[in-house]
Image: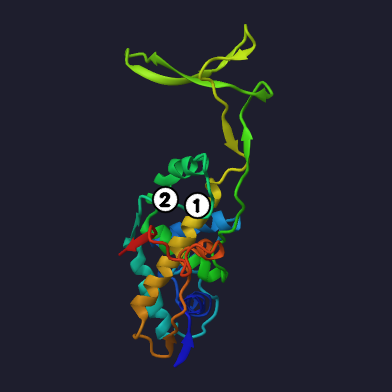
């Protein structure tokens, strides 16, 4: 029995064995991995792979090299089961626990894009795992904390304030208005400055979320095939759920308590 970590097993299955499977009818597979695979390839490679995919979501090789290894077929079946997966996100989960974020600007950005995290489908999770196995690299998660810059009006630092007004239905609403008195050339009482992030962290937040989901999906496949392989035996090595917590020295295992959970 060959000792192998789950990530390397996935790469072996999807790069060397499952491409041996033929496409039914010789046309484009209508399976979820095929359609999602094109979308995901566009996102991570900058191009669409213009080639028919077999039922395992990979391009079939153009010559007869025999059937895929039985262990690879078991891996493919476990990955196919991810199509029904769903994600649960803890209320206190943050992709940037190592950042102080005392002004809450990062948290505001994460809250704005949080619905995108919750809407990830099982098909997308499945395709992400396949795409990364084919590419032979893990999703990237590294990035620097952005700085802060004062929000300007007409090229100079602006003043802002809250005032109570009414909407078109007569309901009271709070709105933000200019807090600078142009007559006195002074800020109005209760006026304040505003700051913004110097770099948008939405893309990095999505990258870290995908890295976590990818790790959870790989772990799920490891559980599904463990003890069922004929020529391979999985080692205890599995991808870290939140490697940035290890890099920051926050959680030695990289598995924070308020993590993302995957259910199949």
Mark seen at residue 117: 2
Q: Residue at position x 51%, y 53% from top?
A: 96
- Report if residue 230 is visible in the image: yes
Query: Which residue is more in the foreground, 233 or 19?
Result: 233
Give the image quarter of residue 23. Answer: bottom left
Q: Position of residue 216 (x, y in %)?
A: 41, 66
SS at badge 1:
helix
Q: Residue tagged by mark 1? A: 206
- How packed mark 2 is, by other alpha carbons closer than 10 Å (few <14, some 14-19, many 20 or more), is some
Q: How many labels were placed on the picture?
A: 2
Q: Which x, y percent locates residue 99?
A: 54, 51
Q: Residue furthest front?
A: 189
Quadrant in the picture for residue 213:
bottom left
Q: Which disc is residue 187 wearing?
A: none
Q: Residue at x 51, y 83 (%)?
A: 64
Locate residue 212 relative to residue 81 in the image: left or right. Answer: right
Q: Where in the figure is residue 47, as x and y percent of width and height?
A: 59, 56
Report the coloring of the rendering.
rainbow
Q: Residues within 10 Å of mark 1 (few under 14, many from 20)?
A: some
Pointers 2 and 1 in contact (C-beta within 8 Å): yes
Left or right side of 111 for 187: right
Viewer-side residue, 88 vs 80: 88
Relative to 162, does residue 132 appear above or below in the rendering?
below
Q: Residue furthest right?
A: 155
Marks 2 and 1, how far apart in space?
Answer: 7 Å
User: Residue 162: horizontal and vertical position, in percent?
Assistant: 46, 20
> Which residue is located at x 61 percent, y 46 percent?
146
- Above/below status of 6 relative to 232: above
Is 257 situated left or right of 182 in this image? left
Element marked by disc 2 = helix
């Amino acid at each position: 029995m060959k000792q192998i970590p789950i990530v390397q097993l996935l790469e072996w299955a999807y790069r060397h064995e499952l491409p041996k499977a033929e496409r039914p009818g010789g046309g484009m597979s209508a399976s979820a991995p095929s359609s999602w695979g094109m979308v995901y390839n566009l996102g991570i490679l900058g191009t669409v792979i213009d080639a028919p995919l077999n039922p395992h979501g990979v391009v079939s090789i153009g010559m007869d090299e025999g059937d895929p290894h039985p262990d690879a077929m078991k891996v493919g079946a476990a990955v196919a089961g991810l199509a029904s997966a769903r994600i649960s996100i803890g209320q206190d989960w943050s992709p940037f626990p190592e950042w102080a974020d005392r002004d809450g600007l990062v948290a505001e950005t994460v809250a704005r894009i949080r619905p995108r995290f919750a809407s990830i489908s099982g098909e997308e999770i499945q395709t992400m795992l396949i795409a990364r196995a084919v590419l032979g690299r893990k999703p990237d998660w590294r990035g620097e904390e952005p700085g802060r810059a004062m929000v300007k009006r007409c090229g100079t630092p602006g003043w802002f304030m809250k005032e109570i007004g009414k909407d078109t239905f007569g309901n009271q609403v709070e709105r933000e208005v200019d807090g600078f008195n142009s007559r006195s050339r002074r800020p109005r009482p209760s006026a304040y400055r505003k700051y913004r992030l110097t770099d948008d962290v939405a893309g990095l937040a999505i990258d870290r979320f995908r890295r976590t989901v990818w790790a959870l999906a790989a772990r799920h496949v490891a559980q599904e095939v463990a003890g069922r392989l004929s020529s391979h035996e999985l080692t205890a090595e599995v991808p870290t759920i939140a490697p940035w917590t290890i890099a920051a020295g926050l959680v030695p295992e990289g598995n924070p308590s308020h993590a993302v959970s995957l259910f199949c």
